[in-house]
Image (cartoon, coloured by chain):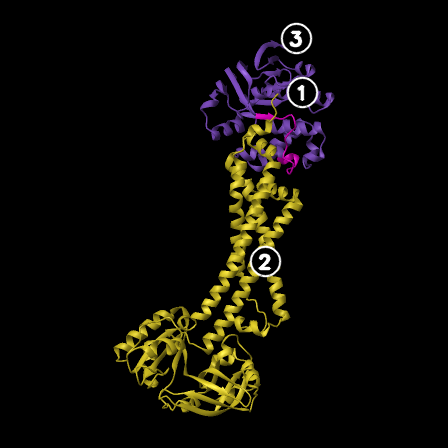
Amino acid sequence: MLLVDLQVAARNLTRHTRRNLFLGAALAAVTGLMVLLGALTAGIEGSMMESATTLLTGDVNVGGFFKITSGSAAPLVSGYPRVLAVTRATVPDLDYYTIRGRGWAKAVSDSASMDLVLGGVDIAHEPAVRRVLQPVAGTLDELARPNTMLLFQGQAERLKVGVGDVVTLSAPTERGVNNTVDVRIAVVVKNVGIMSAFSAFIQADTLRGLYSLSPDATGAIHLFLKDREQANLVAARLREELQRQGWRVMEPDPQPYYMKLFQTVPSEDWTGQKLDITTWEDELGQFKQFIWGVKVFTGLLVFVLMVVIVIGILNTLAIAIRERTREIGTLRAIGMQRRKVLWLFMLETLLLGLGGCAFGALAASALAAGLNAAAIGVPEAVQLFLSQEHLTFKLGFGAAATDVLLLTLVTVAASLAPALRAARLKPITAMHHIG
Amino acid sequence: MSIISVRDVSKDYLLGKTQVHALRGVTLTVERGEFLSVAGPSGSGKTTLLNLIGCVDTPTTGVVEVAGRDTSRLTERALTDLRLHQIGFIFQSFNLVQVLSVFQNVEFPLLLQGGLTRAERAVRVQGLLEAVGIREYGRHRPSELSGGQRQRVAVARALVTRPALVLADEPTANLDSQTGQNIIDLMREMNRKDGTTFVFSTHDPKVMAHANAIVRIADGVVAGREPVGAMA
């Protein structure tokens, strides 16, 4: 029976080719748009998260603040080797870790200056950085030398410097004086989105020198876990253990460290060292908000299109039911139950929905693959937000299949009311004339 | 035992703001195996009577019993089941499903019934197509057939479930006289061979002549029931 039902549904669809092609094309277009927008958002999120989690944060960070007076604050972890030892013992599911200096300085070249959030790196122990950063001039290995700096392409252009040039870093210290250091540009790397606008890297000991810090002081320990999903549990465990071992640990506060440095910590009434355990989600709150914003925008767009589709389906089926009143009446008269009529109409919509949506998803996937291959450049102003130099679509079978299923379900759900109307038609309509 | 018992049935319709009395106190009994014609001019109430007997409409007052069941006491679902298992319909305009082949149109009621295997269905459908003389058109769509051939398909579809009762609403109205004659002959043969009860409406005297008896309707009332031999 199912085969006959499918045949009836398919043949009814092909009977009104133009109308159903139009509706199928609309479904395909909406699905295609959904798949494309989803792939673009995934691409942005993927590249943004990969670069951000590599450059700005670990999965879990053991950072902290040191306050000489209650009104000042420096992003420091003093005596970090001891903290690291406790951390390693407490986090057995650690994949690897990096030691990062944290600072803020004004970079001054011969012709320009700009404010930069500085990361102090030991490039020999930063395996992931090499995966994310692509040098356009110089080599990353050069960053192992003292008094060297890594700039992003946009920063180098703004400061009008290249590899081998020297810039002066001027940083306010916690004692209220400005220290300076001359650093040589060791490597210029491709921009990686919004991070390229404000963050740069210098050799770790050079950062310590700039802030007159001892060798056992650093900004934060970035922990990379075997399973990122465990970050919150690990952070909670670390807080408890470090507190138990005598460190003062700040209450969880889902903000990036620089927001705390400039807004909350200086106004708190305490001095000395406090550790601050954060997760990648805390540190990337703004990025996540941006991604959320993109998703909301695309969601709204798709919702509006879905409403249009639903109206289209309601209209199309209303016309189909009007046209097929006699047929439905006949089928009811010869013994077809109402639920069977309902099933036949919904099956028809299911076929149309599945066909249109699957075609849309396939076409969008092909288009996305083509655009990926074409490596279309993104305007510089947009790069900042997209974290991409080239338009990159991250296609996932699961996401595309979900889009297809969701839209097909919406289509079928939209057909429910007209299908019910069809099912309620009285069989007398087949014998409509009164003789 | 009678297969149809209509007792004091009336049916009123609202046509715009006007109430139309389509049937006014009709009483009729049809025995099993009858080949009965319901005759009358247009608007006399023939189709309304067939609709009530066919369980596709309900009377305003009175009782309609089909195969021993009071239709007013049945649910919509039970009425549908009654139509599926006890009644076959032949429509004036054939009313075939255009997207199905001739074979599938005839097979469709069997699929709704369930119970037969594919092979059993094929044997029954092919047998009927053979009987109505369109076996070679099994794969054709209705739109590829002539009016007479379509009505043969409709006859085969009405008979495929081996119903106790076949209702035909002006089955020859859209056919030329020779084709109409052939269809009536076909129905008559089925009636003789299988004992299937046929009730068909017509206002064509040539068609009426084939019936065992004629029930005449005028202005919504039964004007009389007469054996064919009694016709003038």
Q: Which type of secondary structure does the marked residue at label 3 adopt? A: loop
Disc sitting over residue B184 in the figure: 1
Q: Looking at the image, which residue is at 48% across and 82% down?
A: A115
Q: Colour of chain B?
A: purple
Picture quadrant where residue A280 is located: bottom left
Of badges 3 and 2, nearer the viewer stands 2
What percent of the width, then of the height, locates residue B7?
50, 15
Residue A419 magenta-highlighted: no
Picture quadrant where residue A33 is located: bottom right
Residue designated by label 2? A32
What percent of the width, then of the height, locates residue A267?
32, 77
Q: Looking at the image, which residue is at 49% across and 62% down?
A: A295
Depth check: give the residue in front, B47 or A178.
Answer: A178
Q: Chain of mark 3?
A: B
Q: CA distance from mark 3 to mark 2?
A: 72 Å
**Dot 3 crowding, Cα within 10 Å, few <14, some 14–19, many 20+:** few
Name the quadrant of the C terminus of chain B: top right
Depth check: give the residue in front, A29 or B131.
Answer: A29
Label count reads: 3
Magenta span: B88-104
Residue designated by label 3? B231
Q: Which type of secondary structure does the marked residue at label 1 adopt? A: helix
Q: Which type of secondary structure does the marked residue at label 2 adopt? A: helix
- Among the two numbered marks 3 and 1 on one chain, the one whose residue lies closer to the N terminus: 1
Picture quadrant where residue A279 is located: bottom left
Q: Colour of chain A?
A: yellow
What percent of the width, then of the height, locates residue A332?
55, 32
